[in-house]
Amino acid sequence: MRETRSDGELLRAIAADGDRRAFEELYRRYAPWLTARLRGRCADAGIVDDVVQETFLAVWRGTARYREEGDPAGWLWRIGSRRLVDTMRGDGARGRLRSALARLRHRDEASAEERVLAGVEHGDLAGALTRLSPELRAVLQATVIDGLTTREAAVLLGIPPGTVKTRALRARKQLREALA
């Protein structure tokens, strides 16, 4: 009976030898999970499927390199979520995002995402973000843009989860004040 290889061993085999079986095993382990997580951020199953394929293609081709730091699932999520953001930035992405958010939220008040997008359109968000300290910007990048959980962001940034929460609160407060 064959022993199950760790995620790190699979990734090393893919990077070093182009091991197809290692790639297939990694894909079977993580593609359903990544698809489910991305569908939580995008209702279009076609876009999600394309992003999942692009994510694993980047792993196979070696354009995304795992540095053996942190959790492989978090690394794959980061690649996938960034590719999803890139895809959504295409023509009409803001409109698709707004309509998806409107369907999910049955409130008269604008969602946080809609307020952020309105700030992007008016050009004041970029300035507000640059005024944040690098530590606060890194936490926002990990938790808001990359969609990582507090724990995943803590591992990625090498700080305790409580610090991630505190910095996220401070960053949001500073952004609210700057955008008000």
Image (cartoon, helix red, strand yellow):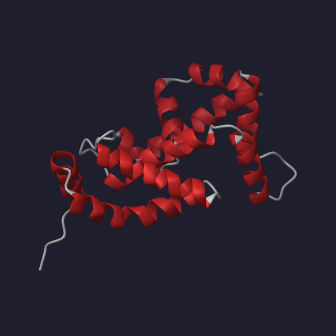
Q: Position of residue 105 (x, y in %)?
A: 77, 57
Please determine whether, in this image, residue 41 is positioned above or below residue 115: below
Residue located farthest toward the bottom when viewing the structure as drawn: 1
Q: Residue at x 57, y 42 (%)?
A: 87
Percent from the top left, x then y, of residue 129? 60, 25
Name the side, left or right, on which 64 lies relative to 107.
Answer: left
Who is closer to the viewer here, 135 or 23? 23
Residue at 30% over, 49% down: 60
State which quadrant residue 63 falls in: top left
Which quadrant is home to the N terminus?
Answer: bottom left
Image label count: 0
Q: Position of residue 33 (x, y in %)?
A: 44, 64
The answer to whether residue 180 is left or right of residue 32 is: right
In the rendered view of the protein, which quadrant contains the C terminus? top right
Q: Residue at x 46, y 48 (%)?
A: 80
Residue 116 is situated, as x and y percent measured from the top left of the image, at 71, 36
| Nearer to us in this view, 36 or 147 | 36
